[in-house]
Image (cartoon, rainbow, N blue to C red):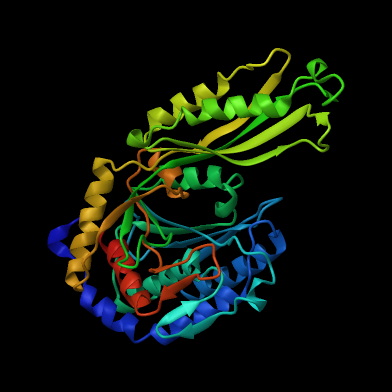
Amino acid sequence: MNASALPPMKRFLRDLSRQQSAMVRMLGRFVRAESPSYEKAAVDRFGRIVAAEWRRRGARVALLRQRKRGDLVRAELFLGRGRPLGQILVLGHLDTVYERGTLARMPFRVEHGRAWGPGTFDMKGGLVQALFAAGVLRHAGVTTQKRLVFLWTADEEIGSESSRRLIEQEARRSDAVLVLEPSFGKDGRLKTERKGVGAAELIVHGRAAHAGINPEAGVNAVHELALQITRLRKMNDPRRGITVQATVVEAGKFSNVIPDHARAEVDVRVARRQDARLLNRKLRALRPILEGARIEVRGGINRPPLERSAGVRRLFRHAQLLADEIDIDLGEASTGGGSDGNFCAALGVPVLDGLGAVGDGAHSPREYLLVRTLPERAALLAGLLASL
């Protein structure tokens, strides 16, 4: 990072502002290509569209095949001479939380400076910005010292099980990771801290009996689960950023039967890596309270936290300097949600997250992005790619 030799940010922004309409048209095409996480064929169709756009920009593109989930798209650019002196990884995802057919009730539209539709904000706007950032670098004749790798995964919204190994493999080769998840707030803050995230399942086995005739012969799985949830509540520590929340509970079929089975899904989040290990141990240490009950605990923290390390702070400060060149006041934020950037940060690689679209309403019928910010965010990304 060389702050004394910043790239021509004003030129990037000028050229990209002239392409704002083209960016919106591409966004519309991307949003209309619905890509629900669980529908491999749909995600693959969208991935092929994205891959074709990268080929048009001279990138070397590979589709990384997956058996159950959508294929990943890997696009590689090197705009330098000789051999690259390292690698920058740009990370994002193709999948959305919306089921196919959502467009019928939530169509893509542009009104009053906002682009609405499923996945506009999270995160097809970020995919558009990356393509146009790469285009403006080529048009400006910028040379880069490092290889630029753009990795678009296909299962981020459902835990990244099939893509985690490939993400970590690319991150280990990289000097920095730029994540095109949506920004924080309508002022476009970057995310320099993210909580570690996980899902645990608590399963209770009891013994069935008639609730009126011989309840003492049973072991009530609901009662045991309630006692265990009380234990889970005591694991919360808001000051340390630890949250443990029972979110889904299932048990019983008939009102006159002592239930012999109950289960709870538990959302778990931590701000520090050491707390992830501690919390997982606490979950595994849970033991039955009622005589005759048996419990199973599955899962736990599986996405480590993105902590605000010295490398993250330096990366954010560099982004601020670039933003200053185009009169953008760039802020930072911490968030309770996780992203694929968490995996990279856990490897010790500096990560800058939230570089994607500016808007609101992710995962809801109110999802939108602010159209005027598309060129600004693409210019910021171009500046980072040119100067890291």
Image position, residue 280 (x, y; %): 51, 27
Furthest residue to the top? 291
Identify the residue at image location x=84%, y=25%.
Answer: 212
User: Can you say whether 15 is above or below 35 in the image?
Assistant: below
- The residue positioned 38% from the left and 43% from the top of the image is 306
Q: Position of residue 96 (x, y in %)?
A: 58, 62
In the depicted structure, whether residue 112 falls above or below residue 204: below
Q: Residue at x 35, y 63 (%)?
A: 185
Which residue is at the front of the view, 80 or 241?
241
For residue 34, which quarter of the picture? Answer: bottom right
Instruction: Report the side of 163 relative to 254 (left or right).
Output: left
Figure quadrant of residue 113 = bottom left
| Quadrant assignment for the C terminus | bottom left
Quarter holding the N terminus is bottom left
The residue lying at 24 percent from left, 48 percent from top is: 313
Is residue 339 visible to us here? yes
Which of these two is toward me, 230 or 123? Answer: 230
Q: Is residue 180 left or right of residue 45?
A: left
Residue 86 appears in the rendering: no
Q: How many badges with numbers are in the image?
A: 0
- Looking at the picture, how far across and down is residue 365, in whole percent? 55, 70
Q: In the displayed image of the protein, which residue is found farthest to the front?
A: 212
Residue 360 image point, x, y percent: 43, 67
